[in-house]
Image: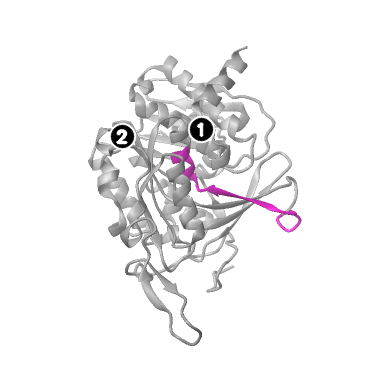
Amino acid sequence: MALTTCPFQFISLSSKLDYPTNRFPGPSVFLRRTAAGSPPSVYSFRRHVFKARAHPGNNGPLEAQNSLVVCFGEMLIDFVPTTSGLSLAEAPAFKKAPGGAPANVAVGIARLGGTSAFIGKVGEDEFGYMLADILKENNVNNEGMRFDPGARTALAFVTLRKDGEREFMFYRNPSADMLLQESELDFDLITKAKIFHYGSISLITEPCKSAHIAAMKAAKDAGVLLSYDPNLRLPLWPTAESAREGILSIWDTADIIKVSEDEISFLTQGEDPYDDNVVRKLFHPNLKLLLVTEGAEGCRYYTKEFSGRVGGVKVDAVDTTGAGDAFVAGILSQLAADIGLIQEEDRLRVALEFANVCGAITVTERGAIPALPTKIAVKNAMLKTVA
């Protein structure tokens, strides 16, 4: 089903997006209501900062932060049904929750006591301002956030099956995150990071694709570690093949990659994701750490020197939204503090146990960001599993 010009559109597997990079030029503006019959007047909006730049969170001077993780990509509103096991049409009500994988990771790291920042674009609308405020309230630096006056903040309606697994329906036609331009990037923030984390959704359309590649290159050139979670969302790509090609197009640049079993099957076109030989095909020469998540079963890890598996934590899943992002936040928060973990298997296993618990706690509540755990909650849960 091709996209039309209606305000919102269900994105099917075959939908295609192609928008010019200069569709919404110029500074952010709002129209002010005037007397009936009079034309509206335009004034610059200064809620956060001039020209739609958000202000930084309460993280202190970035120059002093050598464990900063900068997360790049989409931030949106998830609408999660209050009752599991029903279709979107049958759901009696939805709970509004902030989401978007890179933003989830940024908040997750901050909740765990780490230092994080988010770079991305939202609409110059109430949802966009709400998301910027949520980042600040969670001590995530949001000075790299931009607001688009002509496109709305993305929305996603999530269907929860009885086992807590999800199906998505996205509203983006286009949404503001798709329209981030290279000229809007905060390169100073990017190059100050210890780790630069991103997904693949920002590779789907221009101008965001070019912005993503430019940000990634700037980080790499500055000696920043690159962390990649493809976070496959097939309905957002024009075709399955374009998704596979897009995800793999930047594969060999990353230092750290996290994938799920389903994503391994997809990327290898149906090969067994539990076969180490299959997984090793995805290990490129410059990769430092490849992580494969298996939900409640835990995760597997692969480096050049060793590999293994860390068991998961069994919980009653309510909503798996954000579980993978919580896992990523858990491991990146520790790698940012001590990248040497990658060389020491025993210490890496402890760090992955921590990350597994982060994911397990997150599935016990609805929504992604609202369910992300604090460091104390994770430590307490780990003590209970030992006891």
Residue in front for this viewpoint, 301 or 105: 105
Give, as a three-letter code, the residue at label 1. Answer: Phe
Locate residue 200, reporting x and y percent: 44, 49
When asked about the image quadrant of residue 39, the answer is bottom left
Relative to residue 343, is residue 44 depicted above or below?
Answer: below
According to the picture, the residue beneath numbered tag 1 turns out to be: 327
Residue in front for this viewpoint, 27 or 240: 27
What range of the chain is rendered magenta? 88-107
Residue at point 37% right, 56% down?
A: 146
Residue 229 in sight from this viewpoint: no
34 relative to 360 in the view: left or right: left
- Which element is circle 2 on? loop
When asked about the image quadrant of residue 310, the answer is top right
According to the picture, the residue beneath numbered tag 2 turns out to be: 194
Q: Earlier in the sequence, mark 1 or mark 2?
A: 2
- Which element is circle 1 on? helix
Q: Quadrant of the N terminus?
A: bottom right
Q: Residue furthest front?
A: 35
Residue at point 56% right, 32% down?
A: 359
